[in-house]
Amino acid sequence: MRKTAGAIALGAALALSSVVGTGTGGVASAAPAQPRSLYPASALVFSYGEGEDASSAAVRRAVTLSCRPTSTGTHPTPARACAELRAVDGEFGELTARTEHGRACTKEWRPVTVTAEGVWEGHRVWYEHTFPNPCLKNSVRSQVFDF
């Protein structure tokens, strides 16, 4: 009788531990991730820093931008920034090449670096561009890196 009661107690303890998840025999499995949106992902983080490249720049400001299904984020003009990105199909280099003609900037070397990292239209992206000084960065005619 004593052996039977001990076996029942051991069986109950093992069953309870596998239900609670503290047993060694239970394996948890997760369901595959399902998309929750009809739109491809577009979520970006932009940064602005003082330095010659992203790895050494002292980041002074960073903002977020999400363009689907609506334009949101901490970017100061998310709707306009998303519209500009759609117009160039996410090619950040086309935006940084658009500068004001005739803007007077000194030729001092005080580099600033802008970055864009995240997902654009379902594709992982990374972009980095260094301007010789803040004046030249501010001469870009785009809202995307204006924060």
Image (tube, rainbow, N blue to C red):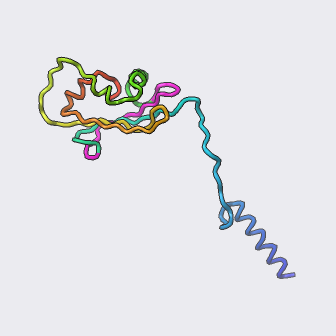
| Residue 43 placement, left or right of 5 | left
| Residue 34 placement, left or right of 62 | right
Q: Quadrant of residue 88?
A: top left
Q: Is residue 85 above or below residue 52?
A: above
Question: What are the residue bounds of the magenta stretch?
Answer: 55-72
Q: Quadrant of residue 59?
A: top left
Q: Quadrant of residue 99?
A: top left
Residue in the image at 47% along x and 28% along y: 67
| Residue 146 placement, left or right of 78 | left
Residue in the image at 26% along x and 37% along y: 113
Measured from the top left, where is residue 147 in percent x and y? Answer: 32, 29
Nearer the observer, 138 or 6:
138
Can residue 56 be found in the magenta stretch? yes
Can residue 5 be found in the magenta stretch? no
The image quadrant where one finds the N terminus is: bottom right
Measured from the top left, where is residue 110 in percent x and y? Answer: 17, 36
Is there any visible trace of residue 55 in the rendered image? Answer: yes
| Residue 127 placement, left or right of 34 | left
Q: How many marks?
A: 0
Q: Is residue 102 above or below residue 8?
A: above
